[in-house]
């Protein structure tokens, strides 16, 4: 993956997630704080692109009607098969519809959408630990339960270059 269309959290929620990352790191659990380039930001990914034409992508996203800020409530801990550990927000029909709209817009440009971000396949999540060992799950659960529930406002949209951590905020919320 190289480029993602993401929603970013409000300042207070961003700080809360970064404190959680730090708490987990202090407990010996590697998080996005130290993963790869170490420039990760707390986010919810709408589309992850394997190939794309950036000018066409920008044009498609600008054509989308601006969305409103959305309050989400993270209230669960989850894991993918390959040990990626994350927070799960309550999923609303509005959030799913927005993701499907973004996925459709980026796909219309000829971009290759990662299969987990295709409409009907998407599972919203906020990554905590990208390579969690099962033996560390109780420690993660303890730290996560200290901060849940976490209400967050998805207040900004951005293109995130996953290889470098470069964040380019979009002109409006998608």
Image: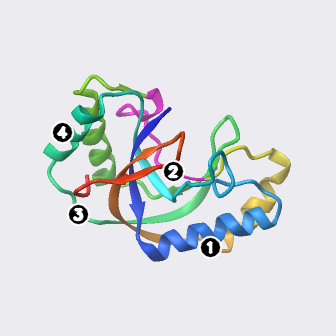
**CB atoms of marks 1 and 2 within 8 Å:** no
Gap in angstroms between the C-alphas marked 3 and 2: 20 Å
Name the residue carrying label 1. Answer: 147
Name the residue carrying label 4. Answer: 59
Residue furthest to the right in view is: 135
N-terminal of the pair, mark 1 or mark 2, is 2
N-terminal of the pair, mark 1 or mark 3, is 3
**CB atoms of marks 4 and 2 within 8 Å:** no
Q: Position of residue 22 (x, y in %)?
A: 69, 67
Front residue (pair 35, 116): 35
Q: Of discs 4 and 1, which sits in the foreground?
A: 4
Name the residue carrying label 2. Answer: 125
Q: Secondary structure at mark 3?
A: loop
Residue 86 vs 71, above or below: the answer is: above
Q: How busy is the neighbourhood of tag 2: few (under 14 within 10 Å), some, or many (20 plus)? A: many
Gap in angstroms between the C-alphas marked 1 and 2: 16 Å
Which residue lies at the image location 75% right of the left edge and 62% below the top edge? Answer: 25
């Amino acid at each position: 993956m190289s480029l993602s269309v993401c929603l970013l959290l409000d300042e207070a929620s961003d700080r809360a997630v970064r404190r959680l990352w730090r708490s987990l790191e202090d407990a010996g659990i590697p998080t996005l704080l130290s993963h790869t380039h170490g420039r990760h930001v707390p986010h919810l990914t709408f589309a992850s692109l394997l190939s794309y034409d950036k000018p066409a992508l920008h044009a498609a996203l600008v054509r989308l009607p601006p969305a409103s800020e959305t309050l989400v409530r993270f209230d669960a801990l989850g894991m993918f098969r390959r040990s990626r550990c994350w927070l799960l927000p309550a999923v609303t029909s509005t959030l799913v519809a927005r993701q499907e709209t973004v996925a459709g817009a980026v796909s219309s440009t000829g971009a290759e959408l990662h299969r987990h971000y295709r409409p009907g396949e998407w599972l919203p999540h906020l990554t905590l630990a990208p390579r969690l060992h099962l033996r560390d799950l109780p420690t993660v659960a303890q730290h996560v339960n200290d901060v849940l529930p976490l209400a967050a406002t998805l207040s900004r949209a951005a293109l995130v270059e996953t290889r470098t951590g470069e964040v380019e905020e979009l002109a409006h919320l998608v």
